[in-house]
């Protein structure tokens, strides 16, 4: 499979005859969409001018946003460093082909990926990077093995040391990430599922979490917090993390603390585990409390984890329209990009996906994709 950007005879395009999805109301209406360069110029009936694309029988939705991906995950086998980078090339291309036009990387990708995308060396969605996940000694992000001691899986100055102990060191860790080009600060507010199972859940102290959030804000950044347990969620949310990732074991206290945060549940990776139902219950609890939901797949090079899977799992709890909202307008709000994308409105970016058929059913989203526009340019698969 090869992706090519189709030549554009003109910068004005009218996408004609489809239904158009408004993620905030959940409604679809019959309308044309006129694109002017990289912007949506007009949405309404009977538009003309420029190149005409017949979209009849289809549904236009905003380009999808995945708020939690790992496009350059280190593999367990001992491969040379370039393998991690090169594996991301088809991953990024595949994301765009599936209508995902913006992603937030939750650790693994450095700022060089953004540079390569900007320069056109790679084809892929717009990328926000967090570099690595901050954490205390023994916490998430501290790779340590009894016979070897500290193991740096990256060994790369563009992915700085994420470890800290104490508020001052926490501030320094944030500054190291910002210096290396992080758009977001990722904090491990609790351990990985394996650590929790093993009873080794070293969490940052509240004053350390506060220092991370405060320093990130001072640097113009927001914080995304990995947190499975209710205790980790409460600490991260009270410290002011903008999004809570995973939140597998939410309870009433966690949901109460999350009133000002977004919840990115990432149901996919553990959807076959013994915690799947607990996780769904956490999502229901959050929705009932009015917590804002944004979609994140926790995509990494592992099977059956991508945004299409996540949307199907979200839809089983929220319904199709709310699942799509979580991956469009609501995701853009979490990322503070809602004045630029996430809805099909004049002035916003021309990131769109044309689906086969008029309904909102997300059961087989990849199978329904007829065309993708990213930044006003049509992206298609070609052999
Ligand atoms: Zn993740």
Image (cartoon, helix red, strand yellow):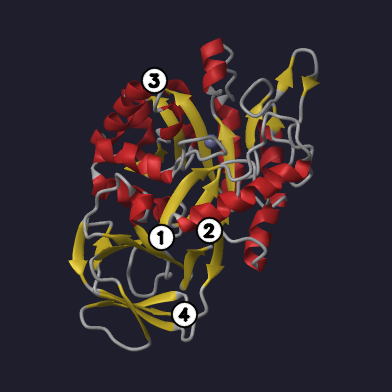
SS type, badge 2: loop
Circle 1 SS class: loop
Ligand 1 under 8 Å from disc 3 Cβ: no
Q: Which mark is residue 325?
A: none
User: Which structural element holds mark 4?
Assistant: loop
Is ligand 1 closer than 8 angstroms to the Cβ of mark 2?
Answer: no
Mark 2 near mark 4, Cβ–Cβ under 8 Å?
no
On the image, numbered disc 1 is attached to which residue?
Answer: 63
How far is disc 1 from disc 3 in space, using C-alphas? 31 Å
Q: In x, y percent, where is residue 1?
A: 55, 57
Residue 328 placement: quadrant: bottom left
Task: Determine whether label 1 and label 2 are within 8 Å by CB.
Answer: yes
Label 1 – label 2 distance at C-alpha: 10 Å
Mark 3–mark 4 distance (CA, rounded to whole Å): 46 Å
The residue positioned 41% from the left and 21% from the top of the image is: 273
Earlier-in-chain disc, 1 versus 4:
4
Pointer 3 residue: 275
Residue 125 is tagged as 2
Label 3 vs 2, first from the N-terminus:
2
Q: How dense is the environment of label 2, judged by Cα within 10 Å: few (below 14), some, or many (20 and up)?
A: many
* Residue 37 disc label: 4
Sequence-wise, the earlier of marks 2 and 4 is 4
């Amino acid at each position: 499979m090869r992706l090519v950007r189709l030549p554009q005879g003109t910068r004005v395009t009218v996408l004609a005859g489809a239904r158009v999805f408004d993620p905030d109301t959940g409604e679809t209406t019959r309308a044309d969409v006129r694109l002017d360069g990289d912007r949506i110029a007009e949405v309404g009936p009977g538009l003309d001018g420029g190149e005409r694309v017949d979209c009849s029988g289809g549904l236009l939705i905003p380009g999808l946003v995945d708020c939690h991906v790992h496009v350059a995950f280190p593999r367990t086998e001992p491969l040379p460093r370039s393998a991690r980078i090169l594996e991301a090339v088809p991953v990024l291309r595949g994301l765009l082909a599936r209508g995902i036009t913006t992603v937030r990387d939750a650790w693994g990708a450095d700022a060089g990926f953004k540079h390569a995308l900007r320069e056109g060396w790679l084809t892929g969605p717009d990328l926000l990077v967090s570099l690595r996940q901050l954490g205390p000694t023994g916490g998430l992000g501290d790779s340590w093995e009894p016979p070897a001691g500290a193991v740096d899986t990256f060994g790369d100055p563009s992915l700085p040391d994420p470890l800290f102990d104490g508020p001052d060191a926490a501030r320094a860790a944030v500054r190291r990430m910002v210096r290396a080009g992080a758009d977001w600060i990722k904090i491990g507010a609790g351990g990985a599922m394996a650590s929790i199972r093993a009873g080794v859940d070293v969490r940052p102290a509240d004053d350390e979490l506060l220092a991370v959030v405060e320093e990130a804000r001072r640097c113009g950044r927001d914080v995304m917090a990995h947190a499975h347990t209710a205790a980790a969620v409460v600490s991260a949310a009270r410290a002011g993390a903008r999004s809570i990732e995973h939140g597998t074991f939410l309870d009433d206290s966690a949901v109460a603390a999350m009133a000002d945060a977004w919840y990115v549940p990432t149901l996919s990776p553990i959807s076959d585990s013994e915690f799947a139902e607990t996780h769904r219950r956490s999502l229901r609890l959050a929705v009932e409390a009015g917590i804002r939901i944004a979609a994140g797949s926790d995509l990494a090079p592992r099977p059956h984890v991508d945004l299409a899977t996540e949307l199907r799992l979200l839809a089983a709890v929220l319904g199709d329209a709310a699942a799509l909202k979580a991956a469009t307008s609501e995701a853009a709000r979490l990322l503070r990009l809602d004045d630029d994308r996430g809805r099909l409105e004049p002035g916003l970016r021309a990131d769109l996906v044309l689906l086969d058929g008029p309904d909102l059913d997300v059961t087989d989203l990849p199978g329904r994709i007829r065309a993708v526009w990213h930044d006003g340019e049509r992206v298609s698969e070609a052999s």
